[in-house]
Structure formats: structure tokens, C-alpha cells
Amino acid sequence: FVIDSRYRSRRPMIITTNLKLAELKNPPDLAHARIYDRILERCAPILFAGKNFREENAGATRQAAKDIVNRKQD
């Protein structure tokens, strides 16, 4: 609904996604195709390549949880 209403009113959109451009151009079904088509018409794709900081943070979070559990068992 949000994308469609901004699209129809010609309002600007900034969209972030983990989808690759190829995935946006080859949607899995008609509903996604319509949304992705609107996004690609109104937005210029920009690739930000680099480390996945969430993955790194998740590793630290898992280790902290293990440390807490191990302390409670001692």
C-alpha cells in the first residue's frame, strides 16, 4: 500500500533491501512483479558492497548468550 500510494502521487521513495537487482527484475509472482516494477521505475539502484555487519554482530551476540548460560551453570 505504501509503495503504491507514493508511486501514484509521484512522491519520492528511498528503499533499502537485501535483494539483488536480478531478484528485483525476476520476481517470484505477479504481486511481487507489480511492486518491484514500481520500485525500479522510481528508484535508481545503488549497490553498497562490503562486510555484513549484522552477521558479525550476531556472532558476538551468540557468544555473549553462551557466556551467560555457562556462568549460570557454574
Image (cartoon, grey):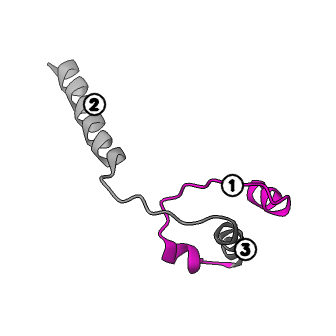
Compared with 52, 29 (above or below) is: below
Residue 1: image quadrant is bottom right
Badge number at residue 28: none
Q: Could you tell me which quadrant the C terminus lies in?
A: top left
Callout 2: 10 Å neighbours few (<14), some, many (20+)?
A: few
Q: Is residue 66 left or right of residue 20?
A: left
- Give how far across and how far down residue 37 sits, in percent: 68, 74
- Give how far across and how far down residue 67 sits, in percent: 20, 27
Q: Nearer the viewer, mark 3 or mark 1?
A: 1
Badge number at residue 13: 1
**Kind of element beneath mark 3:** helix
Of all residues, the one furthest to the right in this rendering is 9
Q: Residue at x 18, y 26 (%)?
A: 70
Q: Nearer the viewer, mark 2 or mark 1?
A: 1
**Kind of element beneath mark 2:** helix
Q: Earlier in the sequence, mark 3 or mark 1?
A: 1
Q: Nearer the viewer, mark 3 or mark 2?
A: 3
- Give how far across and how far down residue 16 sits, in percent: 55, 54
Callout 1: 10 Å neighbours few (<14), some, many (20+)?
A: few
- The residue that mark 2 highlights is 65
Q: Is residue 54 magenta?
A: no
Compared with 27, 71 (above or below) is: above
Range drawn in magenta: 1-29
- The residue that mark 3 highlights is 34
Residue 10: image quadrant is bottom right
